[in-house]
Image (tube, rainbow, N blue to C red):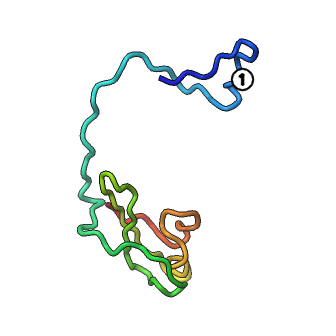
C-alpha cells in the first residue's frame, strides 16, 4: 500500500497534504454485489442529455447521463420547474451548475 514520504529531514511534511482518517490491517473479504432498488428505477434510460438553449428542455423532461463506460452505467435526471428549467439545456446534470436545473431521478 501507499506510505507517505518519510524523509528524515522533514518526517512530518506529508501531514501538510494528508489527514489520517484510520488504519488498515490485513485485507477485507469481498463485498456483496450492488443492490437494486426498484423505487429508484426509471425503467429504460431516457435519451442522453445534449447541450441546447434555455428552452431546450421543459419541466419534467428526463435525460440520462453516462457516469461509467466500463461497465456501462447511466443515471437519469428530471428537469425542474420554471424558472429553473431554463438551466436544463445549458448545464449537464453532472457538471457545475447542473443542480440548478436537474434533480436525480434514478438509475
Outermost residue to the right: 9
Crowding around mark 1 (Cα neighbors within 10 Å: few <14, some 14 to 19, many 20+) is some
Q: How far across and down, in percent of the image, does residue 5 sit?
A: 63, 21
Q: Percent x, y for residue 64?
A: 37, 69
- Which residue is located at x 25 percent, y 47 percent? 35
Q: Is residue 32 above or below residue 3?
A: below
Query: Please, is residue 74 above or below residue 16 in the view?
Result: below
Residue at the spot 24% in from the left edge and 67% down from the top edge: 43
Query: Which residue is at a point 53% across and 63% down the rendered structure image?
Result: 95
What element does badge 1 sit on? helix
Q: Nearer the viewer, residue 7 or 19?
A: 7
Along the viewing direction, whichever of 81 and 54 lies nearer the viewer: 54
Q: Is residue 84 above or below residue 27?
A: below
Check disc 1 and report the residue beneath it. Answer: 13
Residue 29 spot, x, y in % from top left: 28, 25
Q: Position of residue 6 (x, y in %)?
A: 65, 16
Residue situated furthest bottom in the rendering: 55
Amino acid at each position: 500500500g501507499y506510505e507517505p514520504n518519510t524523509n528524515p529531514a522533514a518526517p512530518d511534511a506529508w501531514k501538510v497534504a494528508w489527514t489520517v482518517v484510520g488504519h488498515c490491517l490485513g485485507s477485507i473479504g469481498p463485498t456483496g454485489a450492488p443492490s437494486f432498488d426498484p423505487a429508484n428505477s426509471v425503467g429504460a434510460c431516457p435519451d442522453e442529455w445534449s447541450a441546447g438553449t434555455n428552452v431546450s428542455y421543459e419541466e419534467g423532461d428526463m435525460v440520462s447521463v453516462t457516469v461509467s463506460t466500463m461497465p456501462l452505467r447511466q443515471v437519469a435526471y428530471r428537469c425542474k420547474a420554471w424558472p429553473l428549467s431554463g438551466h436544463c439545456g445549458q448545464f449537464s446534470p453532472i457538471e457545475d451548475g447542473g443542480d440548478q436545473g436537474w434533480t436525480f431521478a434514478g438509475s
